[in-house]
Each structure stands twice: as C-alpha cells, then as structure tokens.
C-alpha cells in the first residue's frame, strides 16, 4: 500500500478537525460505522478461491445477487462474467490465475462498490497494467462515479491518464501537499506538477 493512502485506510486522519463525512465531524462518529463507509481498492487486487459472486460479496453476509450484478455493471466487469459458462458461479481458483490484471482489478472495484461506500480509496489502481486494461479500468472508475456522483473518490497514482480528469489533483512532494488544482490549472502554473510532466515522472 502506498504511503499516501495508508493513513486514510487506517482512519488515522479521523482526529483532524478538517475531516468530515457528509458535513459531520468524523471524530464524533462510531469508528466501526465510519470504516464501513470506505471502499478500498489496492494496487494488487486480492482474490480468493471462491466463485466470482462470492469474491465480489466477500466480507458481507446475505448480499442479494441483484446487488452483486449491479456492482459488477458499475465496475465494467458484468459483460465478461456473463459470458463465462458458469457466469457468477465460476470458481476463481488460486489467485485468480485465469483472469487478466484488468479483470482482477475490476472485480476488486466491484467488491468495493457493492458496499455502497461514501468514500472510495484507490491505491495505484492501474500501475501494473498495459494501456488496454488501463483504459477499461479507467472507464469503470468513471462510470462508477457517474452512477453515484455524491461519492468521493481518492486516487493515489503516478499515471497521468488516471488522474487528469479528477476534479482536484493534490501534488505531494516529500509527504507534503505542494500544489492543488485541476490538470489544466496545474499545467498553467508551471510548478511541481508541470515539471513532473516534463520529466515524465507522470506517465
């Protein structure tokens, strides 16, 4: 897990006076409930030797099949699953070796979305993918945001294509936010973000 997302995933920032969830001071919220409002997608998705449906619903009880399919649609993986001979009852197998990196990541996104989180945290979600799979996963993330515009998505990434359409980009340097703005605003300023682009630190 990247150092940028680790404190958020562990709710370290729940003590901040600035941190709010739906206008509520998160220091006043029940920690267990607060954690349930977050969905997390890791750089390396974790799959289990279960069916695809069970992988998407993993950690939850009595999830209706309709909710599983709806989450898969939002994650842009339903069509792939639906074409498999056993569909959602297909066993993933050890580490999901028959799935591509993009397919694994979209299943992980579906697992996060089935929880209907208020905040979606994504840790380098496309860093290990080729351009084709990156494009598909990016479409899934954009579609998920369209489906629930009230959800906040926080993305840690070194890939320009993953972040350039974000409403707000925060540029970190040595653990500190040194710039923030849209892609266009940051490019015009010719600061740290612009230099990262010029040096191809953002691919």
Image: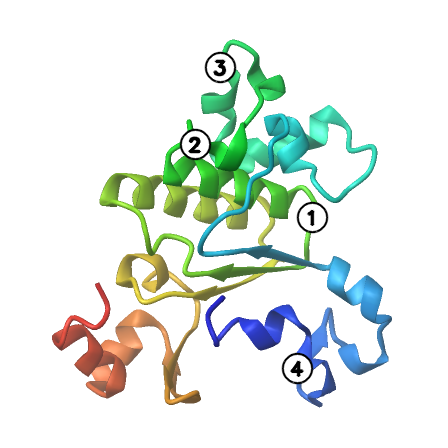
How far apart, in angstroms, are the residues tagged by discs 4 and 1?
A: 21 Å
Please name which of the two marks, 4 or 1, marks the residue nearer to the observer: 4
Q: Earlier in the sequence, mark 4 or mark 1?
A: 4
Q: Earlier in the sequence, mark 4 or mark 2?
A: 4
Read off the residue under disc 1.
116
Residue 91: % across, % down: 58, 22
How packed mark 4 is, by other alpha carbons closer than 10 Å (few <14, some 14-19, many 20 or more), is some
Q: Earlier in the sequence, mark 3 or mark 4?
A: 4
Read off the residue under disc 4.
13
Secondary element at image label 1:
loop
Tell which of 70 and 62 is nearer to you.
62
Residue 1 visible, this angle: yes
Rendered position, 84 above or below 102: above
Read off the residue under disc 2.
97
Tell me, for residue 84, which label it has, or none. Answer: 3
**Side (left or right) of 158 relative to 108:** left
**Residue at point 43%, 32% (across, down):** 97
């Amino acid at each position: 897990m990247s150092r940028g997302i680790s404190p958020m995933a562990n709710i370290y920032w729940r003590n901040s006076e600035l941190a709010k969830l739906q206008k509520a001071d998160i220091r006043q919220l029940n920690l267990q409930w607060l954690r349930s409002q977050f969905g997390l997608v890791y750089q390396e998705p974790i799959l289990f030797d279960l069916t695809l449906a069970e992988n998407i619903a993993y950690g939850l009880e009595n999830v209706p099949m309709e909710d599983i399919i709806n989450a898969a649609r939002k994650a842009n993986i339903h069509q792939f699953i639906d074409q498999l001979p056993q569909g959602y009852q297909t066993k993933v197998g050890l580490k999901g070796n028959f799935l591509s990196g993009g397919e694994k990541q979209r299943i992980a996104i579906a697992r996060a979305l089935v929880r209907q989180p208020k905040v979606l945290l994504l840790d380098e979600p496309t860093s290990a993918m080729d351009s084709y799979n990156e494009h598909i996963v990016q479409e899934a993330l954009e579609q998920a945001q369209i489906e629930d515009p009230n959800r906040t998505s926080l993305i840690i990434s070194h890939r320009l294509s993953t972040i350039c359409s974000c409403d707000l980009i925060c540029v970190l340097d040595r653990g500190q936010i040194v710039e923030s703005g849209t892609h266009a605003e940051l490019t015009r300023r010719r600061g740290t973000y612009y230099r990262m682009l010029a040096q191809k630190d953002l691919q």
